[in-house]
Image (cartoon, rainbow, N blue to C red):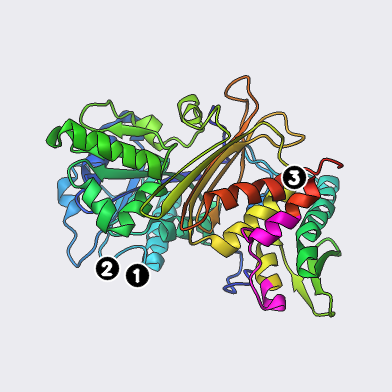
Amino acid sequence: MCALCGVLGGPEHWTDATPRPGIFTRNTDAAARRRERLHRVAAANRVLKHFGMSLADWQGSAFVLSTATGKTEIVDNIAHLWMSAERLLGRPCDPLDPALIVRMEREIG
Amino acid sequence: MAEAVADLTPVTLITGFLGSGKTTLLQRLLLDPALADTAVLINELGEIGLDHHLLERIDDTMVMLQSGCVCCTIRGELSAAIKNLHSRREQGTLPPFRRLVIESTGLADPFPILSTVRSDPVLQHHFTLGNVITTVDAVNGSRQLDTQPESVKQAAVADRLVLTKTDLSDRDTAERLIKRLRRINPEAPLWCSSKDVVDANLLVERCFGQAEIASFPEDEQQDHSHINDISSLALSLAEPIDWTRFGIWMTMLVHRHGNELLRVKGILNIAGSETPVAIHAVQHLVHPPRHLGAWPDAERRSRIVFISRGLSPSAIQRSFRAFSMPSICR
């Protein structure tokens, strides 16, 4: 269900496309799905830590987003991650924020 | 280089400002054998549909939507009309059309139309988005770009641009307009309808062909330009991109700036993938990434174009690199 509008059977997220001819996806089999899921959590945490937040896998079916003060929210898929993060934080998570870009640049060396 | 993308019916959108020649183009396309099995939906502003009188081929696969602008009032009607066509095709009361063409009103914002096809719980399983073809009037196009924000957006989101009425415009005016369109949308192939042979196949087929990729920047690291607050940024990178990190970044960018991000299109050199991945987004709508069969040339470079309104191209470039590149120590 779409967390934004409540419509059942919303579109698949493009990062999690169903395997079909011509489509690039890592959602191909159980092992690849699991590996990509863990990689995705790590990639999200690389950004979320700058907001004092963290993401964890929840039984391979959802994610748990947490703040440093213990507020948590279940996130169905990556499409809803940033909406939930902004709601818990109370401010925007902007990838074009110059201060955030500088911090991310330091990480890639 | 077109790869098969499941067995879904492609939906082509023909858009363009009022009087820019959408119906004339559609008329020409429908005469081409390549579009023989095509159903057509026409949306018109106002109570009485007029455009269909100009079309020569009206049959059961053509439905008129007459109750208003498709982008703001009749998305439900658009969805119902497409479902109706699909249902009749399945029942065998319509010929088994292989393609659907929607002609929007001149005032329509293309995004909600695309979003309807992509997001509707039923339509997404039977239809896939094809190209957005935008017609631009060579005589009035510049003025419309100056005064009508919809026309700028229509040009920015186009996969194919068709400059019409070039026979009525002087050469300098047409060339200036082409330069403006190139700055708004640097990589969409452009035809002049009165002098070029408009190949229906090339217009409607969704593919990253050689010609299209050749229009992406090759040598320069980046190139950007501004017009009417619209900026385009073209990046060309040799380093492989971390797909998962790119997904996190792109999702974040689309969430925060989707309204201003008119279009993103490119091919990516993904770490661990032998062949390129094509990425295509219009505002909040990101198409499923396509895995292309081969690189267009010997250079395995990511080439990606961002067309946005009011966003800093240099910030997008820095952010893209900082978020999507693998760490050196990884």
Q: Which stretch appears magenta? A: A86-103
Viewer-closest of A30 and B247: B247
In this rendering, the answer to whether B245 lies above or below B112 is above
Classify mark 3: helix, strand or loop: loop
Badges 3 and 1, same chain? no
Picture quadrant where residue B202 is located: top left
Between disc 3 and disc 2, the foreground one is: 3
Residue bearing the label numbered 1 = B73
Residue A90 in the figure: left or right of residue B38: right
Which residue in the structure is indicated by mark 3?
A26
Drawn side of residue A2 relative to residue B258, left or right:
right
Q: Position of residue B143 (x, y in %)?
A: 22, 51
What type is the residue that disc 3 sits on? Arg
In three-dimensional space, the C-alpha distance between marks 3 and 2, rounded to whole angstroms, equals 43 Å
Three-letter amino acid code of the residue under disc 1: Thr
Q: Residue at x 33, y 35 (%)?
A: B36
| Residue at 46% over, 44% down | B10
User: Looking at this view, is B94 or A59 the one in front?
Assistant: A59
